[in-house]
């Protein structure tokens, strides 16, 4: 997170908003944050570019221009920026030489070519009958983190899966007790997902309203100035899945299908699916997304 305190005001006066020393120490201790004073009145656009540059640097160039032009102006008091980027290597890597162009079935009528990676190994897998979905665990190095692919058997089954999804069900479907280590033939698209959100409206709908309202917001734990309030909340995440792992970075048209062949499970993610990245010890979900089209 980047918290930018401000020097802001109007034609007649300039108010200085100073962060409490205790808050600065806690932010540095627990979040490795380096708060700094900025001038939203006299240099709003320069501040915006500086924040964007910091985000781009911290995400190794993957997330650029998080704050759009006009998102910061002379009336800005406090901006919350969340840039989420993850890079991990598979415990068992895909061989790039095995990647082939294959059709991805967007729906029952439309396909698009996608680089389809292939890997043969033993992985945790289960089938959830209630939502007719295969669940595959792809662990990262050291097994602290895993990516789970939730692949409906039906090409158009993703929305049904999403409608049924709760944290409790997701925890149950991905629990070690339910999954079984199987010999697998895994086909997974090489893909990138990048999303950007202005969370002000979403948070307001969830009941967080006072924080955005001058005169009602209470940030006295951060600053002695009583009239400090939150102007904007921006969130952007980046996930890239490739042969090496995940970087939050002659064609064949043969038709494939997920199935069990003897003692081997054939897992083919060639139609819309959900994916999550989970910290296994705490069961904390770091990313949750869907891949619907190349």
Image (cartoon, grey):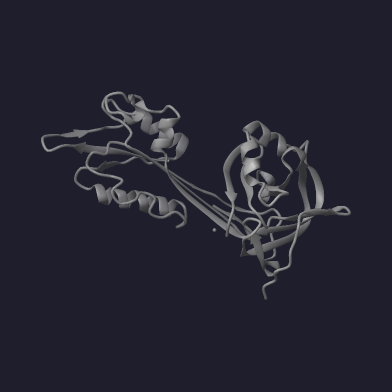
Residue pushed farthest bottom?
250
Q: Residue at point 26% right, 51% down? A: 46
Nearest the viewer among 57 and 162 is 162
The x and y percentages for residue 239 are 55, 52
Q: Report whether 128 appears left or right of 43.
A: right
The x and y percentages for residue 224 are 28, 25
Nearest the viewer among 203 and 248 is 203
Task: Give the quadrant of the N terminus.
Answer: top left
Residue pushed farthest left?
12
Task: Give the quadrant of the C terminus.
Answer: bottom right
Could you tell me how many numbered marks the image carries? 0
Nearest the viewer among 85 and 197 is 197
Q: Is residue 179 above or below residue 20?
A: below
Q: Residue at point 57% right, 44% down? A: 287
Q: Report whether 189 appears left or right of 205.
A: right
* Quadrant hosting residue 23: top left
Q: Is residue 270 above or below residue 213?
A: below
Q: Residue at point 44% right, 51% down? A: 58
Q: Report whether 135 appears left or right of 277.
A: right
Residue pushed farthest right?
262
The x and y percentages for residue 230 are 33, 33
Q: Residue at point 75% right, 61% down? A: 256
Q: Is residue 289 above or below residue 13?
A: below
């Amino acid at each position: 997170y980047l918290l930018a305190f401000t020097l802001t005001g109007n034609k007649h006066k300039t108010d200085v908003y100073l962060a409490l020393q205790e808050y600065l120490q806690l932010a540095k201790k627990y979040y490795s944050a380096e708060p700094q004073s900025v001038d939203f009145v006299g240099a709003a656009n320069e501040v915006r570019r500086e924040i964007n540059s910091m985000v781009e640097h911290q995400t190794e160039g993957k997330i650029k221009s998080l704050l759009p032009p006009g998102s910061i102006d002379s009336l800005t008091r406090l901006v919350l920026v969340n840039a989420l980027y993850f890079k991990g290597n598979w415990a068992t890597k895909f061989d790039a030489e095995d990647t082939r162009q294959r059709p991805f079935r967007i729906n029952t009528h439309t396909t698009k070519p996608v680089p389809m990676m292939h890997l043969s190994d033993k992985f945790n897998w289960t089938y959830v009958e209630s939502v007719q979905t295969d669940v595959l665990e792809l662990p990262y190095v050291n097994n602290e983190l895993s990516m789970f692919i939730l692949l409906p058997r039906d090409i158009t089954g993703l929305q049904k899966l999403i409608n049924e999804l709760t944290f409790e069900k997701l925890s149950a479907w991905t629990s070690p007790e339910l999954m079984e280590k199987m010999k697998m033939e895994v086909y997974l698209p090489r893909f990138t997902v990048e999303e950007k959100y202005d969370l002000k409206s979403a948070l307001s709908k969830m009941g967080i309203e006072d924080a955005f309202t001058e005169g009602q917001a209470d940030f006295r734990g951060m600053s002695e100035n009583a009239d400090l309030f939150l102007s904007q909340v921006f969130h952007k995440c980046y996930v890239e899945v490739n042969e090496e792992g995940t970087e939050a970075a002659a064609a064949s048209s043969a038709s494939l299908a997920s199935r069990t062949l003897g003692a081997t499970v054939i897992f083919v993610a060639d139609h819309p699916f959900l994916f999550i990245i989970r910290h296994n010890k705490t069961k904390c979900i770091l990313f949750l997304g869907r891949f619907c089209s190349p």
